Amino acid sequence: MSINKEIKRVTTNTLQKMKETGERISMLTAYDFSFGRIIDDSGIDIILVGDSASNVMAGHETTLPITLDQMIYHAQSVVRGISRCLVVVDLPFGSYQGNSKEALASAIRIMKETGAHAIKMEGGEEITEGIRRIISAGVPVMGHLGLTPQSIYKFGTYQVRAREEAEAEKLRQDALLLQEAGCFAIVLEKIPATLAGEVTGSLTIPTIGIGAGGACDGQVLVMHDMLGINHEFRPRFLRQYLNLHEEITKAVRQYISDVKSGDFPNEREQY
Ligand code: KIV
């Protein structure tokens, strides 16, 4: 007997329906095949191939150094591991800010070379021309407002953004502009929960929060942070579900000890 295991893929339309019915959207980052597969099999709605790969995979201090070629490599690996969720890929710093033609060329490379389903871009009014051009080529775009790590040297700090009314008002306007430009969703990073709730209520497209409170339509975390791999990073907004740093350290120490003592491999572990 053959079992009809029809896979229901998550699309941008699915996310829109989730906003309308009040079902929360779950999103996590992944940067490789193995974790992409585990997270997809677990039932996540969206995998973000984030430029946070620059920090957690490559060990850079900021997201600025990662290149378009490197993002494409990570996205290709993730896409090979998934069969159901929506895969969104960050356009890295320097691949879209120059002009809308450059932005479109970068987005097209990601879509053609990786098989991902959408791209994400940081910024508001200043990048709407690029967003429109990319969307008119048929590529779905997710926006990103609030703490936008590619602008860290402009902010000078990773603290909460838009506490002041002028910045909050710009964020409200930018969110509406991104929606008008055709974005299918917007990430709101590290802003006051009341502001995120207000923005979420003012939009017809979903918001996905990180450090932006519970009123957003969905939540995203960096997978390495929520699994406790990157164990030094403990901001208030982060819920750590595992302490993998500790678990992995224990396992590696046990392995070293087994090798040194001659316990590994034993009779059953050899040919
Ligand atoms: O790159 C990333 O991981 C992100 C999330 C923090 C939203 O942009």
Image (tube, rainbow, N blue to C red):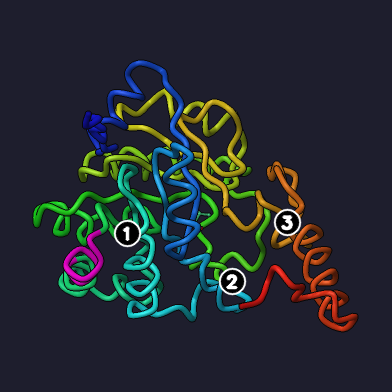
Check disc 1: other Cα within 10 Å, few if <14, some if 14-19, many if 20+.
many
Q: Specify the quadrant that holds the C terminus.
A: bottom right
Residue linked to disc 3: 244
Q: Which residue is mark 2?
A: 55
Element under label 1? helix
Residues at circles 1 and 3 in contact by the CB criterion of under 8 Å: no
Q: Where does residue 140 sit, x and y in percent of width and height? A: 22, 49
User: For the residue marked with disc 3, what is the amino acid?
Assistant: Leu
Badge 1 is on which residue? Answer: 79
Q: CA distance from mark 1 to mark 3?
A: 24 Å
Marks 2 and 1, how far apart at CA: 21 Å
Which image quadrant for residue 55? bottom right
* Residue at the (56%, 78%) spot, across then down: 58
Marks 3 and 2 sit apart, C-alpha to C-alpha, by 17 Å
User: Is residue 10 found left or right of 199 in the rendered image?
Assistant: left
Quadrant of image for the N terminus: top left
Under circle 3, the secondary element is: helix
Q: Residues within 10 Å of mark 3 (few under 14, many from 20)?
A: some
Q: Residues within 10 Å of mark 2 (few under 14, many from 20)?
A: some
Q: Where 217 falls versus 248 (above or below)?
A: above
Please tell me which residue is depicted at 42% across the width and 45% down the height of the picture: 40
Q: Residue at x 20, y 63 (%)?
A: 111
Highlighted range, magenta:
108-115
Return the x and y of residue 250 as percentages of the image width and height: 83, 63
